[in-house]
Image (tube, rainbow, N blue to C red):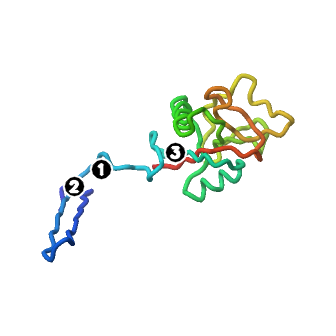
Amino acid sequence: MSKCPNAQSFFSLSPESEDTVVISVSLCSQGPIPNSPACPPGWTQLGSRCFIFYFTPRIWSDAEAFCISIGGNLASIHNNEENDFLSEMITRDTGNPSITWVGGHDAITEGQWMWSDGSKFDYSSFALGQPDNFAQSENCLEINYSGNKWNDRVCNQPWPFICAKKV
């Protein structure tokens, strides 16, 4: 019986010469291999989720459909750390705090905010006076409206967006 149920073996072949050299390494780990990337290239990890910013503007529903097509959803935000992290990610990628779609909406019932990934809407950071459902037509959530605060916005306006998926 193996003393390491999570043993991982790796090998490399050297095709540079007629004499093939095989290098074999066996690692034992109780969890993920240290320093191995948990997120795909281009994604940034925070906690148990990976995030990616897309600068190409899309309307909210198209942004959500795109995020689903790559294995995620528009980002949900559950605490101040995540809110600050996403705001900083946007500023890093664009040079300024650009207004950006995330996965919040109240399209089903006005005033009852939900996340498109199905997670609980357990945190908010709306700007003063928001959400206001201006002209009774604002049902989607943007961040970086006033600093790193949130605002409800008409869903058919194209904005950059952030996708998220579990590690």
- 104 vs 144, nearest the viewer: 144
Q: Is residue 49 left or right of residue 59?
A: left
Q: Is residue 139 left or right of residue 102?
A: right
- The answer to whether 96 is drawn above or below residue 105 in the figure is above
Q: Secondary structure at mark 2?
A: strand
Quadrant where the N terminus is found in the figure = bottom left
Which numbered dot is residue 51? Answer: 3
- Residue 124 in the image: state x and y as whole percent: 64, 30
Give the class, few, some or many, for how many residues have Cα within 10 Å of label 3's Cα (few <14, many ≥20): many
Q: What is the CA distance from the residue labelled 2 to the residue labelled 1?
A: 9 Å
Q: What amino acid type should be assigned to the residue bearing mark 3?
A: Phe
Q: Kindly check if marks 3 and 1 are in contact, taking CB atoms under 8 A apart as contact.
A: no
Which numbered dot is residue 33? Answer: 1
- Residue 78 in the image: state x and y as whole percent: 56, 35
- The answer to whether 129 is drawn above or below residue 40 in the figure is above
Q: Please tell me which residue is depicted at 19% across the width and 71% down the height of the picture.
A: 16
Q: Please tell me which residue is depicted at 66% across the width and 51% down the height of the picture.
A: 63
Which quarter of the figure has residue 107? top right
Q: What is the CA distance from the residue labelled 3 to the residue labelled 1?
A: 21 Å
3 or 1: tag closer to the N-terminus: 1
Q: What is the CA distance from the residue labelled 2 to the residue labelled 3?
A: 29 Å
Q: Kindly check if marks 2 and 1 are in contact, taking CB atoms under 8 A apart as contact.
A: yes
Which numbered dot is residue 27? Answer: 2
Q: Secondary structure at mark 1?
A: loop
Q: Is residue 127 left or right of residue 39?
A: right
Give the class, few, some or many, for how many residues have Cα within 10 Å of label 1's Cα (few <14, many ≥20): few
Q: Residue furthest right?
A: 135
Q: What amino acid type should be assigned to the residue bearing mark 2?
A: Leu
2 or 1: tag closer to the N-terminus: 2
Q: What amino acid type should be assigned to the residue bearing mark 1?
A: Ile
- Residue 72 in the image: state x and y as whole percent: 56, 52
